[in-house]
Image: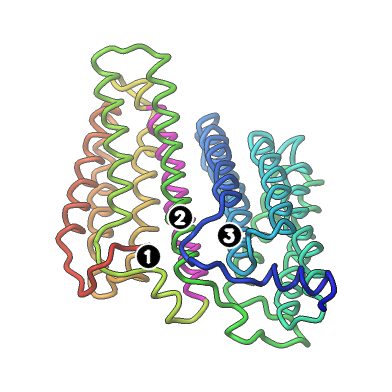
Amino acid sequence: MADPRQRRLERLLRKRRNPREISFHELFFDLAMIFALTRVAQRVLDELTLLNITETLVLFAAVWWVWIATAWSTDWFNPDEPYLQRLIIGIMFAGLLMAAAVPNAYGSHGLLFAGAYTAIHLGRGLVILPALRGHPLQARSARVMIWFGVSAVPWLIGALLPASPRLALWAVAIVIDGASAWFGWPVPGLGRLPVEYLRVVGEHIAERYREIYIISLGAPLLVSGLVYSGAGFDYFRTVAFALTFASTLLLLWSYFLPYGNSLGTIVNKTHPRTAVTAAYCHGLMIAGVAVTAVGNEMLVRQPVGDPPHSWTLVVVGGFALHAIGRTLFGILMFEARRPWRGPVALVVVVGLTPALFDMPLLVVAGLVVAVHFCLVLSLARVRTPASTPAPG
């Protein structure tokens, strides 16, 4: 008869019957991303400077890595095991603390942000490692924890320094976290992990990426809806509100078009690094969604008149950032021979930007939506051999 520790280990490593099935704890955890994205968007809106945008992108990258690492954990381990469910709940609460600290993360709340971030990653290892005692997969969790321990140093030291060195150290920490995952968390003296230890279940991780992307689209809808309901229902604001809805709808369609390939199949058949690459691409797209949410608020608040140039750049920048991520994702998925659509749309919008500085935001947003619509039509015309919807 197996001892309790062995039975818990077996339950923790048990694979789900349906790879595409998402547990309710995973869905509940995703809700924290809506709050985090609105905090990120609000921080950009509060001060439209290059420095503030750079600072906010670093904060967004940290929030995104919390989600990614948690998604991989629920892929590697059984999310129906109470042991892991309690871990997910704890990570969600710490993630909410991070999101709450975003507005003043480079001020008095820096230690809260960095402390919550490092506690999530190191705490995950402290919980998982004892449960895997004696199992070969313990080596994987140990290496992951070691690298998050390395990045914890610049995170925590940076939290104790003024804003400028804090930004530099936190940017280094994000690079460490991203690069270590890309190379499979190699540790000098311990060697590299076997490739099979780094694999995720393609169908599950593809479903997780798809769901968090759809959930993120709630941010631009929420922001524009709140502004519209409070600012008045005049004609120009109503048109602006309609444009924000159209832009969000186009963000949805551009993700799923063209139909044909399955991200889950690609992840299963290629190197585990593909799942990491897909995480980077989704991070760029969701960052674009967050910037779009900022642009939506400006658009609905002041659709006509002479806006600051920074407002125009935000409206254009949200589309541009998403287009870059979507193009890279398309190359990963099925457009290696046709990567020109996104770049062409990006060149058109960026090329027209100087002329847009003297135009109302309603005109700027209308042009961006028109170009995005043409891009979606172009993607819809792509024919791929497979018949299953992509990218799930």
Mark whose residue sits in front, 1 or 3: 3
Which residue is rendered at x = 28% and y = 40% of the image? 354
In which quarter of the view is residue 143 placed?
Answer: bottom right
Point out the tag, 1 or 2, that comes first from the N-terminus. Answer: 2
Q: Residue 284, which numbered label?
A: 2
- Amino acid, disc 2: Leu
Q: Badge 3 is on which residue?
A: 71
Could you tell me which quadrant the N terminus lies in? bottom right
| Residue nearest the observer in this picture, 219 or 138 | 138
- Amino acid, disc 3: Ala
Which residue is rendered at x = 44% and y = 81% of the image? 270
Residue 299, compared with residue 315, is above or below; it is above
- Amino acid, disc 1: Leu
Q: Residue 328, which numbered label?
A: 1
Could you tell me which quadrant the C terminus lies in? bottom left
Q: CA distance from mark 1 to mark 3?
A: 21 Å
- Does 29 sit left or right of 369 as displayed? right
Residues in magenta, as a range: 273-298
Q: Quick check: is 350 in the magenta stretch?
A: no
